[in-house]
Amino acid sequence: LNLTKEARDLMTNRKYDEALKLAQKGVEFYPTEVEGPQLVKEIEEAAKQANCAAMVTQGREMAANHRFAEAESLAKQALALIPENPEAASLLGELPKLKQSYADELLTTTRASYKRQRQQAYENLREIFSLFPEQREAQVLQGEMDTYFAHLDALRKKALSAGEGQADFDTMAAIIELRGLIPEDQEVAALWRKHCTFENSIGMRLIFVTPPPGNSRASARGFFLAELETTEDQWAKIMPQYQTNMIYGDSSAKTWNSDGTYYHPAQDHPVCQVSLPDALAFVQKLSGQEEKNYRLPTVTEWGHACLAGQPA
C-alpha cells in the first residue's frame, strides 16, 4: 500500500519514471495485488500523454522559429506514440501553411529590400529554396537580383578604374549611375565628389550631368552644370563694369572685415536683370579666365538636369 501511495504521489507530480519503478516493484513484491498492474498501466499511459504533449509543445516552438523540418519530425514522433492525438495531428496539418506563409513573407521582404541588403537577400532566397526548391517566384526574383548586382558590380569596377587619375566621361557616367543606385555608399560618394564635381576660381561648384536623351553634339557625352545660379558676387568678379540690381546701398547690412573688405548679403543673391548678350559675354570671359569652355545650357540640357534622373 505504501508503494502504491508513493507511486501515485510521484505520478501526480509528473515524476513518471520514478513512479513506474515503484509501481513495478509493487507488482514484483505483491503479484496477487490487483491494483498493481492497473497502476503500472495508468503511469505508462500518463507518461505517454505527457511525452506526446511535450513533443507537440516543442514542435510548435520549432515552427515558430521557422525550423519546420524539426517541427514535422516531432509531430510525427508524437503521432507514433499516440496515433490519434489531436494536437499532434493539428500541428502536422498546420505546417504546410506555416511554411508557405513564411516563404511568402521572405519573398516580399527580399523583393522590397534586396538593393539595400544584398547578403541578407541571398540568405533569404536560400531559406525559401530549402522549403520549396522549385518555387517559381523565388527563381524569378533570383534572376532579377543576379542581373541587378552584376550591373552594379560592373559599374563599381568602371567607377574604381579612375583611381587617382582623371575620370573620362564614361567613368563619370558610371559613378553617377552608381551613386543613384546606392546613395548611402560612402566610397561611391567619395568618387562622385572627386571626379564628378569641381569648384572654379570664382566659387562656382559644378556637377557632372549625364547626357540627356536626344542630346546635341556639344553634350553627347555629358556636361558640367553649375550647382546653383550665378551670384551677384560671382558676376561682379568677371563683369565688374556691368551693374545689376545688387542692393549694396544699405550700409547697415554690410559686415566689415579687418582688411577693409566687407560682406553684404546681396552678394549671395542670384544675379538678375542681365541681358542675353551680357550673359554670353560673361561665359566667354569666364572661359578665358578658367581656360575651360563655359557656355549657357541648352533647353534640353536644362530640362534634363532639372529632372535629376527622374523620368519626365
Image: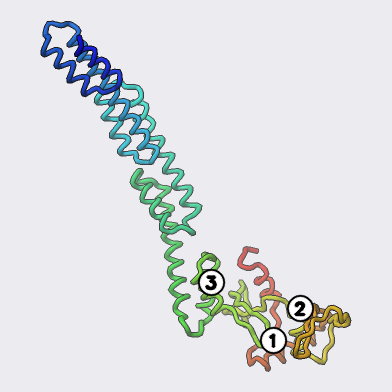
Determine whether label 2 and label 3 are within 8 Å by CB.
Answer: no
Q: In which image quadrant can residue 216 be found?
A: bottom right
Q: Is residue 285 above or below residue 250?
A: below
Residue, x 53% and y 77% (percent of image)?
A: 172
* Residue at numbered disc 2: 268
- Going from N to C along the chain, the mark reached first, 2 or 1, is 1
Using the numbered discs, state the Cα–Cα distance from disc 2 to disc 3 in whole angstroms. Answer: 27 Å
Using the numbered discs, state the Cα–Cα distance from disc 2 to disc 1 in whole angstroms. Answer: 12 Å
Using the numbered discs, state the Cα–Cα distance from disc 1 to disc 3 in whole angstroms. Answer: 24 Å
Helix, strand or loop for disc 1:
loop
Q: In which image quadrant can residue 66 be found?
A: top left
Can residue 82 be seen by looking at this rendering? no
Q: Can you tell which mark lies on residue 189?
A: 3
Front-most of 79 and 258?
Answer: 258
Helix, strand or loop for disc 2:
helix
Name the side, left or right, on which 217 lies relative to 62.
Answer: right
Q: How dense is the environment of label 3, judged by Cα within 10 Å: few (below 14), some, or many (20 and up)?
A: some
* Residue at numbered disc 1: 202
| Residue 38 spot, x, y in % from top left | 20, 10
Front-most of 63 and 47?
Answer: 47
Q: Quadrant of the C terminus?
A: bottom right
Q: In which image quadrant can residue 283 be found?
A: bottom right
- Going from N to C along the chain, the mark reached first, 1 or 3, is 3
Can residue 196 be seen by looking at this rendering? yes
Kind of residue sitting beneath label 2 = Asp
Residue, x 68% and y 82% (percent of image)?
A: 204
Kind of residue sitting beneath label 1 = Ile
